Image (cartoon, rainbow, N blue to C red):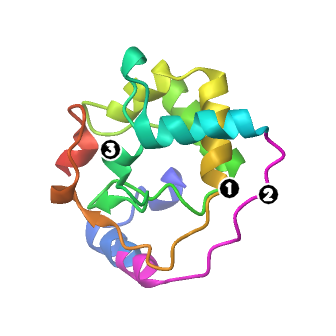
C-alpha cells in the first residue's frame, strides 16, 4: 500500500480519505466466541479498567467510553475481527506499526502478555457495534499518558 500511495499528492490523499470516511457501510455481526467466560472477563476488565498494577491504562481511556474512537486520530475498536486486532497488537510490539512519538500504543502493547492480547481481542470482537459510531471529540478524553496520536 505504501508504494501505491507514495507518489500521490497530499491533496489527493485528503480527497480519498474524505471520500472513504463519508461512507457508512454496515458492520459485520459480532464474532461468536468459543473463548472461556473467564478469558472474556479478563479482556473486559482490561478494556474497561486497565491494570494499574502493571501501568496498563483502560482502552476506554483513549478510545472513548463507547470505544468508537476519538477525533481526529484515535480509531474505534468495534466491528473488528479478533484476528485483525491480534495482528495490530503484534505489529505494535514488532515495531512495524507505529505512530507519532511518543508512541503510547507501542508502549502499551509491550506491556501486554500474549494472554492479555488474546483476551482483549476476543472480548472486543464479540461486542456489538452501536448504531451511532460517531467518535468522541478529543477534548472529551483524558489521555492517561503522553501520546503522539492525541496531538494530531
Marks 1 and 2, how far apart at CA? 6 Å
Q: Which residue is mark 1?
A: 126
The residue drawn where x is 37% and y is 22% is: 52
Q: Which mark is residue 61?
A: 3
Marks 3 and 2, how far apart at CA? 26 Å
Q: Are marks 1 and 2 in contact (CB under 8 Å)?
A: yes
Q: Which mark is residue 32?
A: 2
- Dot 2: what SS? loop
The residue drawn where x is 23% and y is 31% is: 145
Please, what is the dominant secondary structure of the magenta stretch?
loop
Is tag 1's residue or tag 2's residue first in the polypeptide sequence? 2
Left or right: where does residue 83 sit relative to residue 64? right
> Picture quarter containing residue 56?
top left
- Looking at the rendering, the stretch of residues picked out in magenta corresponds to 18-35
- Dot 3: what SS? helix
Image location of residue 128, percent across then percent down: 61, 66
Is tag 3's residue or tag 2's residue first in the polypeptide sequence? 2
- Dot 1: what SS? loop
Q: Is residue 97 visible?
A: yes
Q: Is residue 22 magenta?
A: yes
Is tag 3's residue or tag 1's residue first in the polypeptide sequence? 3
When the figure is inspected, residue 28 is found, relative to residue 122, above or below; the finding is: below
Amino acid at each position: 500500500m505504501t508504494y501505491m500511495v507514495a507518489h500521490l499528492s497530499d491533496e489527493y490523499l485528503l480527497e480519498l480519505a474524505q471520500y472513504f470516511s463519508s461512507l457508512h457501510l454496515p458492520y459485520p455481526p459480532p464474532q461468536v466466541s468459543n473463548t472461556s467466560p473467564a478469558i472474556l472477563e479478563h479482556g473486559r476488565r482490561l478494556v474497561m479498567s486497565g491494570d494499574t498494577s502493571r501501568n496498563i491504562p483502560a482502552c476506554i481511556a483513549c478510545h472513548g467510553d463507547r470505544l468508537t474512537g476519538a477525533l481526529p486520530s484515535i480509531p474505534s475498536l468495534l466491528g473488528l475481527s479478533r484476528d485483525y486486532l491480534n495482528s495490530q497488537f503484534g505489529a505494535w510490539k514488532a515495531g512495524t506499526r507505529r505512530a507519532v512519538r511518543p508512541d503510547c500504543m507501542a508502549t502499551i502493547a509491550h506491556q501486554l502478555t500474549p494472554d492479555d492480547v488474546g483476551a482483549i481481542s476476543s472480548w472486543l470482537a464479540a461486542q456489538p457495534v452501536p448504531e451511532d459510531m460517531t467518535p468522541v471529540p478529543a477534548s472529551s478524553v483524558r489521555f492517561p499518558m503522553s501520546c503522539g496520536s492525541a496531538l494530531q
